[in-house]
């Protein structure tokens, strides 16, 4: 039964006043729902800003592609700067089924470095962020220098300023993080690089994709790794906004 049919049925059963009451109830329910969604977003921004204040770092805010200091060719396939929300990132890192101490962590399109900072609360061998905008890379370096978390377990954190296409992957076991940083043709090239690196040295590679871009996930699927959704161990999952997916090599 569609909405109009339901309305006609209610009007027949309860009269015009009954139908008007039902419409008013529906509108009030919808307004409450929208207010709650808005509140969730405000709460997310509040948590992210509180993270920056607590650690004296600058990782928040959105910066459009036009505002990035990169060449126009790069701008065509780049995505704006938007940091991964702190609760979602913590939920993802907590849920990874890996012995962090055996892996090197890479964030492709690392921006101001929030992911690098939070990843350092796990005992990775080392952590590398690849960012093509020099202004964001400079902020990331300052953030890394200021970062002072009691939970920090990895001190080897670096931001490198280069196009993701040119980044040569280390031949260590890898956890690779993507928050939809770029589109084709960059992602095609990056996937080829990962494939080639894995062909030369088969090893454990775990790729975390945070986002909802099906095309991006389709390209990652070309690697032939197993794929599954990441579920948070936390009682109130922070992974509501976007989903996290894990692609794993067979090693
Ligand atoms: C959505 S933001 C993600 C930031 C960070 N990874 C996080 O999750 O907090 C995408 C980032 O990718 C960077 N980016 C886009 N294209 C790039 C490319 N070809 N090479 C390196 N970085 C790139 C952008 O400048 C931006 O900082």
Image: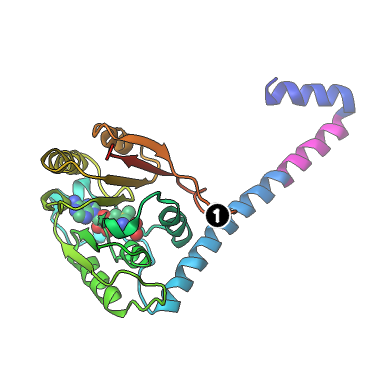
Rendered position, 207 above or below 6: below
Residue 4 coordinates in the image, percent (x, y): 70, 24
Left or right of 35? Residue 238 is left
Q: Which residue is mark 1?
A: 234
Count numbered badges in the picture. 1
* Colour mode of the rendering: rainbow
Left or right of 251? Residue 171 is left
- Quadrant containing ligand 1 reads bottom left
> Can see residue 94?
yes
User: To which quarter of the image does residue 126 belong?
Assistant: bottom left
Please tell me which residue lies in front, 84 or 228. Answer: 228
Residue 114 coordinates in the image, percent (x, y): 34, 65
Question: In the rendered structure, does residue 114 fall within the stretch colored magenta?
Answer: no
Per the picture, the main secondary structure of the magenta-coloured stretch is helix
Left or right of 32? Residue 211 is left
Residue at the spot 48% in from the left edge and 73% down from the top edge: 50
Circle 1 residues within 10 Å: few <14, some 14–19, many ≥20: few
Residue at the spot 44% in from the left edge and 56% down from the top edge: 94
Quarter of the figure that contains the N terminus: top right
Q: Is mark 1 within 8 Å of ligand 1?
A: no
Question: In the rendered structure, does residue 22 fall within the stretch colored magenta?
Answer: yes
> Can see residue 81?
no
Residue at the spot 39% in from the left edge and 76% down from the top edge: 149
Residue at the spot 31% in from the left edge and 80% down from the top edge: 146
Residue 43 coordinates in the image, percent (x, y): 55, 63
The kind of secondary structure element at disc 1 is loop
What residue range appears in magenta?
16-28
User: To which quarter of the image does residue 13 belong?
Assistant: top right
Residue 143 coordinates in the image, percent (x, y): 30, 74
Quarter of the figure that contains the C terminus: top left
């Amino acid at each position: 039964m569609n909405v109009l049919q339901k309305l006609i049925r209610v009007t027949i059963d309860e009269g015009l006043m009954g139908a008007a009451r039902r419409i008013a109830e529906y509108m009030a329910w919808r307004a409450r729902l929208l207010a709650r969604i808005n509140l969730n977003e405000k709460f997310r921004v509040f948590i992210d800003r509180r993270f920056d204040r607590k650690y004296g770092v600058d990782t928040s805010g959105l910066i459009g592609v036009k505002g990035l200091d990169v060449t126009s060719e790069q701008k065509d396939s780049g995505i704006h700067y938007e940091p991964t929300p702190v609760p979602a990132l913590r939920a993802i890192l907590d849920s990874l089924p890996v012995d962090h101490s055996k892996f090197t962590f890479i964030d492709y399109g690392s921006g101001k470095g929030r992911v690098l900072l939070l990843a350092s609360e796990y005992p990775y061998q080392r952590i590398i962020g690849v960012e093509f905008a020099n202004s964001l890379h400079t902020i990331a370096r300052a953030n890394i220098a200021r970062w002072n978390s009691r939970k920090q377990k990895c001190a080897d954190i670096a931001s490198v300023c280069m196009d993701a296409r040119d980044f040569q992957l280390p031949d260590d076991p890898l956890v690779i993080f993507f928050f939809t940083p770029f589109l084709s043709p960059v992602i095609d090239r990056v996937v080829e690089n990962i494939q080639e690196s894995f062909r030369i040295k088969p090893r454990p590679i775990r790729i975390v994709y945070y986002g909802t871009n099906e095309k991006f996930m389709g390209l990652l699927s070309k690697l032939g790794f197993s794929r599954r959704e990441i579920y948070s161990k936390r009682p109130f999952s922070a992974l509501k906004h976007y989903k996290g997916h894990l692609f794993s090599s067979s090693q």
